[in-house]
């Protein structure tokens, strides 16, 4: 997994900045979001290596 240093946050692509902001708002501050919104932002974070892919568990 990679990391983002906040000193270099502005150097990240806009899509990554928005996904990080969403992640913080959703996980830390409890911002309400639909599953579709969450999945869209998480997919960006997964693609750039900032979040491990969420594995769905079938049959539980």
Image (cartoon, grey):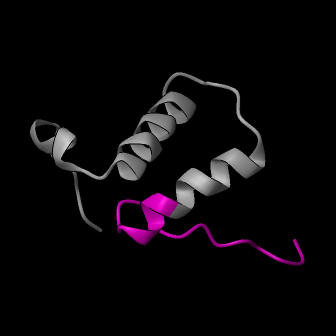
Magenta segment's dominant SS is: loop
Total tally of numbered discs in the picture: 0
Q: Position of residue 17 (x, y in %)?
A: 35, 43
Q: Who is closer to the viewer here, 60 or 24? A: 24
Residue 20 shown left or right of residue 33 in the figure:
left
Residue 46 shown left or right of residue 54 in the figure:
left
Residue reaching furthest left?
A: 7
Residue 43 shown left or right of residue 32 in the figure:
left
Residue at (46, 66) in percent of width and height: 46
Residue at (55, 63) in percent of width and height: 43
Residue at (76, 48) in percent of width and height: 35
Q: Who is closer to the viewer here, 26 or 60? A: 26
**In the rendered image, which quarter contains the N terminus?**
bottom left
Q: Position of residue 11 (x, y in %)?
A: 17, 47
The image quadrant that residue 2 belongs to is bottom left
Residue at (24, 50) in percent of width and height: 12
* Magenta-tinted stretch: 44-60
The answer to if 27 sits in the magenta stretch is: no
Q: Who is closer to the viewer here, 54 or 14? A: 14
The image quadrant that residue 40 belongs to is bottom right
The image quadrant that residue 20 belongs to is top left
The answer to if 56 sits in the magenta stretch is: yes
Residue 39 vs 46, above or below: the answer is above
Residue reaching furthest front?
A: 14
Q: Position of residue 10 (x, y in %)?
A: 19, 39
**In the rendered image, which quarter contains the C terminus?**
bottom right
Residue reaching furthest bottom?
A: 59
Q: Position of residue 9 (x, y in %)?
A: 20, 41
């Amino acid at each position: 997994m990679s990391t983002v240093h906040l000193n270099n946050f502005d150097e990240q692509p806009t899509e990554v900045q928005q996904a990080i902001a969403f992640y913080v708002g959703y996980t830390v501050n409890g911002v309400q979001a639909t599953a579709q919104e969450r999945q869209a932002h998480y997919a960006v974070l997964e693609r750039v290596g900032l979040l491990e892919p969420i594995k769905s568990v079938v049959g539980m």
